[in-house]
Amino acid sequence: MKHWDTVAVVGVGLIGGSIGLDLLAKKLARRVIGIGRRQTSLDAAKRVGAVTETTLDLRAGVGDADLIVVCTPVGRIVDDVLAAAAAAKAGTLITDVGSTKQSIVAGVAGRLPGGVTFVGSHPIAGSEKSGPEAALLDLFDGRTAVVTPAADTPPQATEAVEQFWRQLGSQVVRMTPADHDRALAATSHVPHIVASALAAVTPEEWLTLTAGGWLDTTRVAAADGELWVQILTDNRREVLTGLANVERRLAAVRQALENCDSNELETLLAEGRTRREAAGKLRPRTSSNSSTIKGT
Amino acid sequence: MKHWDTVAVVGVGLIGGSIGLDLLAKKLARRVIGIGRRQTSLDAAKRVGAVTETTLDLRAGVGDADLIVVCTPVGRIVDDVLAAAAAAKAGTLITDVGSTKQSIVAGVAGRLPGGVTFVGSHPIAGSEKSGPEAALLDLFDGRTAVVTPAADTPPQATEAVEQFWRQLGSQVVRMTPADHDRALAATSHVPHIVASALAAVTPEEWLTLTAGGWLDTTRVAAADGELWVQILTDNRREVLTGLANVERRLAAVRQALENCDSNELETLLAEGRTRREAAGKLRPRTSSNSSTIKGT
C-alpha cells in the first residue's frame, strides 16, 4: 500500500479533520499539515490528532506536499486549488472533497502550472455537524467516494486519487463531473431542501408531537446553511431539475388524495417503499472494485 | 398506581404488542388478552411475552376486560370499537391507538351501549417495522401520548386513559380530535408523503451514491403502504392543507434558486435549521404533567 510522506489538508473541518485522523491513525502518511484561516480551528485539529503541524499560510503549508486535499467550502475550492497549485512542487497531486464537481473541475481546467495535477473527488460521507471537533476516525470506511477525472486527466493521477480513497476504506466510483452533479442533486441536494422545508412549515407549538419519523426526515435541515447555499447555487441547474421531479411527484400524490383514489395512492407509496428498501439492502462492495455509474 | 385486572388488546402488531409487553413486564395488568384475526400473529405475540392468552373471537376476548385497547389499522378501528363495546361488560373503558382521531371519535359517538366509555388516544411512537415480533419494551417511555376526549366524554374516563399512558411512561397531551389531526398532518402524515416521494424519484442506479442524509430523510418510506393509505385518506383534508404548505415552501426555494438569490435561500434554510434544532432540544417533560396544545 502506498505511503504518503507529506499530505497537506486545506480546511480542517469535519471532512478534512477526519481525513487527517485516518491518515495518521492508519500510518498512511508521515506528516499531515493542516492549513486553515483561523488559528482556533487549527489548534483544535492538532488537539484531536488530525494533523501533525499547522499553518495559516497556504503557500508555505503546501510546499512539501506529495498530496494536497482541499476541504474548504464549495465556493472557495477553485481558488484554493489554484493557490495551492501555484506553490506546490512539481509532481504534486491535488484533489478536493467538494459536494459539486462540474464547476470545480471546469474552474481548474487549463489553469494549473506544469507538473501539478488535479483530480476532483467527493467522498459521500458526513454529518450535520461541522468543525474539527466533529472529525471521526473511519468516517470514509465502507462509504462511496466518487472520483471525477476530466477528459484530459492523466490516468495514473486518477488511479492515485482512487487509491487514496481506498486507503481510507471507501468504495470508489468513477463518474463524469456532469453525471456526479445530476446524481447528487437527487441523492443529497434536493433531499436537503425538502428536509428544510418540512422542518420550516411545522409550527413550533406542535414540535412535542413529532416522533422519530419527523426527526429523521428533517435531520439534515440542522446543517450549516452557508455551506448549503454554496452547494445549491453551484449545482443550481441540476438541483432545479431534481426539485421539479419531487414537486411533480408530490402533485401526483395530492391528485390521488383529492380524487380519493386509494389504489393510485397505494401504488405511489409502494414505489417509494421499494426504492427505500433497495437502498437499505445495499452493502458496500469490496474496496478493490471500482465501478462506473452512468447518468440517466 | 392503578392495577388492571384484565386488559384486552385488539390487534397485536408493533403497537398492541408493545403495550402488552409493558403491561406484563411492569406488572400493570394480571391478564393481557391478545385478540387478532390470524393465529400466527397471536402465536407470535404470546411467544414474545406480549399477552397471557389469545383468541380469534373478539366477543369472547373482551368479555372480562376492564380496559380494551384497539390497535387495529385506522380503517378498522370504529368497527372494532363498536364490536368490542357490544360484548363488553358494564364499566369497561375502551381506547384506541389510531393515527387519526376526528373520524374515529365521530364514528363512535352516540353508538356505544350504556356503561361502556370510549376515549380516543394516539401514542406518538412507532417504527417503520410492523408485527408482534417488532414489539418493544418501553416503546412509549418518554414519548408523547395524545388523548382526545369528545365534548361529552366523562372526565373520569379521560383521566383513566391518561393515567394508562402515564403508566407506560408517556407524557400525556390532551387535544381536541380536530387539533390532533391538524397537528399530526404536519408532524407525521405529510413527512411520510415527502419521504416516499423523495425515495421514489431517486433512480435505482444512483442508490450507491446515497449517504446518511438520504437514508434518514426517506426512512419512513419503507413503512407498510396499506396502513398509510388508510391514514392519509382518513385525514385527507388536513393532509392536503399540510401538503400545500410544503409545496408552497418548495416553490419559494425554487424561486430563490431560479433568481440566484443567495440571501433569500439562506433565510429559508435558516428557518428550517432553527425549527429542527428546537425539536432536537426538546426533552420529554415529566410524566406527571398534562398539557393542552391548541391548534393554529
Image (cartoon, coloured by chain):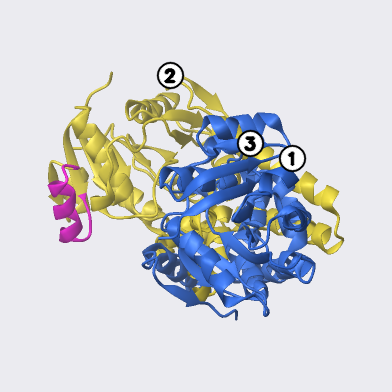
Chain colours: A yellow, B blue
Q: Amino acid at mark 1?
A: Asp
Q: Give the quadrant of residue B130.
A: top right
Chain of the residue on which disc 1 is drawn: B
Q: Which mark is residue A288?
A: 2
Q: CA distance from mark 2 to mark 1?
A: 58 Å
Q: Is residue B120 visible?
A: yes
Q: Is residue B198 left or right of residue B164?
A: right
Q: Is residue B189 left or right of residue A96?
A: right
Q: Label 1, on which residue?
A: B57
Q: Secondary structure at mark 1?
A: loop
Q: CA distance from mark 3 to mark 2?
A: 53 Å
Where is residue A72 shown, x and y percent of the image? 34, 53
Q: Is residue B120 magenta?
A: no
Asked whether disc 2 touches disc 1, contact meaning CB atoms under 8 Å apart, the reply is: no
Where is residue B68 shown, x and y percent of the image? 63, 54
Chain of the residue on which disc 2 is drawn: A
Q: Label 3, on which residue?
A: B54
Chain of the residue on which disc 3 is drawn: B
Where is residue A121 shown, x and y percent of the image? 43, 39
Q: Which mark is residue B249?
A: none
Q: Secondary structure at mark 3?
A: strand
The residue under the point 29% across, 45% down is A16
Asked whether disc 3 touches disc 2, contact meaning CB atoms under 8 Å apart, the reply is: no
